[in-house]
Image (spheres, rainbow, N blue to C red):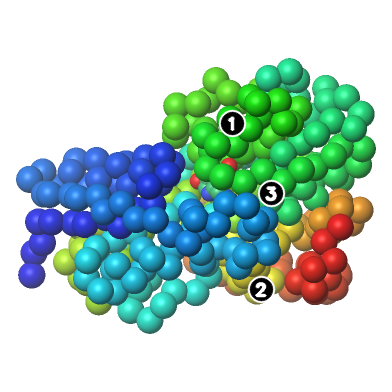
Amino acid sequence: MQKNLVRIATRKSLLALWQAEYVKAELEKHHPGIQVELLGMTTRGDKILDTPLAKVGGKGLFVKELEVAMLEDRADIAVHSMKDVPMEFPDGLGLSVICPREKPTDAFVSNKFQSLSELPQGAIVGTSSLRRQALLREQRPDLEIQDLRGNVQTRLGKLDDGQYDAIILATAGLIRLGLQDRISSELSDDISLPAGGQGAVGIECRTNDDAIKALLAPLHHPQTAYCVLAERAMNKRLEGGCQVPIACYATLNDAGNEIYLRGLVARPDGTTVLRDEERGAPEDAEQIGIRLAERLLAAGADEILSEVYAGNNN
Ligand SMILES: NCc1[nH]cc(CCC(=O)O)c1CC(=O)O
């Protein structure tokens, strides 16, 4: 059966709305005459603002309500930042499309300093990501890392209030919101390897909804999908369920026949950062991720991660 209405369940943050509008525009471009509606929703993750994310249960918090809406047929699809999507999906739902990736880097944002190396001794840097915290501390053990929650605008507001000397945000989010002017510099991925999926947008739908899947198909970007698949396979093998100091980033060569995946697991205080890499064919994306995860585990990642899960974070 053909469909001419697509209902998108979305969070109401400006970034979530941008992503939903992007998918709406793409669907309308590929299927003239189609009707696309946005269904704005508030998730538990949007309500709990005062507790570090790592302590309140991580990623699933931001997607549960959207998934229930799809299962109850109040919505057809949900658009996600792939960085925030849990590894497992509820029965009946799955990821059907991954769109082209925006820049995957982390951005250094400051009103006073141009780059990480310009920060004076003991400067205060805001981030609530254990990954960013660990990699900042590896470079600059003198920095004071302070928690920073909220959506992108909230975080920029706290920087402007003078609570931090600098903050770290995803470059992709700032670009999508038209805030690229706020980026003082991009952090090199040698220093701040991104989180798996960072910069990529994915679309979840009911696995048995062939009509919706057919409408979504032209939005799929296989090159990005292979890379994100390798990254997610690594995260999954490492049990990256909650917020954890894990990073990974895959690229595909121009010929499209080799994935290069880099990954790391770090102590939150940055005193240990286990880095490794792996290459292979795009068709083996998942195996590449698993192989890299297993080498990291053998090198001591298992011990670091069990410490993190036990709560000895600092
Ligand atoms: N953790 C929140 C989040 N999830 C996705 C993005 C934006 C960029 C992306 O699509 O990865 C951000 C903001 C940030 O990390 O600064």
**Could you tell me if the residues under marks 2 and 3 are in contact, i.e. CB atoms within 8 Å?**
no
Instruction: Categorize mark 3 by other alpha carbons within 10 Å: few (<14), some (14-19), many (20+).
Output: many
Between 25 and 223, the residue placed more toward the observer is 25
Number of marks in the rendered image: 3
**Could you tell me if the residues under marks 3 and 1 are in contact, i.e. CB atoms within 8 Å?**
no
Q: CA distance from mark 1 to mark 2?
A: 31 Å
Res 98 label: none
Q: Residue at x 67, y 37 (%)?
A: 168
SS of the residue at dot 2? loop
Between 171 and 213, the residue placed more toward the observer is 171
Q: Residue at x 72, y 46 (%)?
A: 147
Q: Earlier in the sequence, mark 1 or mark 2?
A: 1
Res 156 label: 1
Q: CA distance from mark 2 to mark 3?
A: 20 Å
| Residue 283 on image: x %, y % | 50, 66
Disc 3 target residue: 128
Relative to residue 70, is residue 271 drawn left or right? right
Amino acid type, label 2: Glu
Amino acid type, label 3: Ser
**Could you tell me if the residues under marks 1 and 2 are in contact, i.e. CB atoms within 8 Å?**
no
Amino acid type, label 1: Leu
| Residue 179 on image: x %, y % | 50, 26
Disc 2 target residue: 239
Q: CA distance from mark 3 to mark 1?
A: 14 Å
Instruction: Categorize mark 1 by other alpha carbons within 10 Å: few (<14), some (14-19), many (20+).
Output: many
The C terminus, quarter of image: bottom right
SS of the residue at dot 1? helix
Q: Earlier in the sequence, mark 2 or mark 3?
A: 3
Relative to residue 50, is residue 300 drawn left or right? right
Between 280 and 127, the residue placed more toward the observer is 127
| Residue 32 on image: x %, y % | 10, 43
